[in-house]
Amino acid sequence: MRVNKETAEQLVRAAALDAVREFEKEQKKNKRVHVFQNAKKLMENYNRICQSVREGVSEISDMDNSIELEEFTEEDIYINSILKSKLRSIVMIAHIDKCLKLLEEEEYQKGTPEKYLAFKYFYLDEMTYENVEKVYGYGERTVRRWVTELTGILGVYLFGSDAIMLE
C-alpha cells in the first residue's frame, strides 16, 4: 500500500494533536493531584505551624540589642529570614482558619456536620482514623472517604481558581 505525501502529513498531524491532547489531560490531572497534596500537607502540618508561630523566638524584641540593625551581617540576614518566615506562617494560618470556617459552614448547610467533625478530629485534634471511627460508629473507610472528600474541597477554598480551572 502506497501512502501519498498529503495523507502522511494528515496522519502525522492527527497523531500530534492526539499526543498534545493526552499531554494536556495528564498535566491537568497532575495539577489536580498537586492541589490535593498541598491541601493535605498544610493540614497535616497545621498544628506544627501554629506551634512554631506561638513558641518561636523570632520577634524584633527577642534580638540582642547589641546588634546594629543598619549593618546587615549574615546573622542579621538569617534573623530577617526567620521573621519573614514567621510572617508568612501567620498569614497562612489566618488563610487556613478562614477556609476551615467556610468548609465547616458548607458541611453544616449540607446537613453533614459529622463529615467536618471527622475532618477536624483527624487533622486538628490529630486523632487516628480508628479513634474517629469509634466516636461515630462509622467504618474506618467511611471516615477516610470523608477526610479525603473534605481535603479536596478545602483545596478549592485554599487555592481558589487554580484548583478549579484544572478541568
Image (cartoon, rainbow, N blue to C red):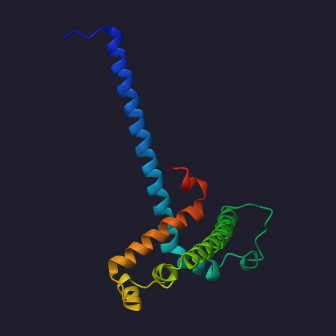
Q: Position of residue 149 (x, y in %)?
A: 45, 69
Which residue is located at x 47 percent, y 55 percent?
32
Q: Position of residue 49 (x, y in %)?
A: 57, 75
Q: Nearer the viewer, residue 40 or 138?
A: 138
Which residue is located at x 47 percent, y 79 percent?
115
Question: Which corner quadrant holds the N terminus?
Answer: top left
Which residue is located at x 59 percent, y 74 percent?
100
Q: Position of residue 101 (x, y in %)?
A: 62, 76
Total residue callouts: 0
Q: Nearer the viewer, residue 147 or 88?
A: 147
Q: Position of residue 128 (x, y in %)?
A: 39, 83
Quarter of image, res 137:
bottom left
Outermost residue on the bottom side: it is: 135
Outermost residue on the left side: it is: 1
Could you tell whether 131 is left or right of 52 in the image? left
Looking at the image, is 144 positioned above or below residue 21?
below
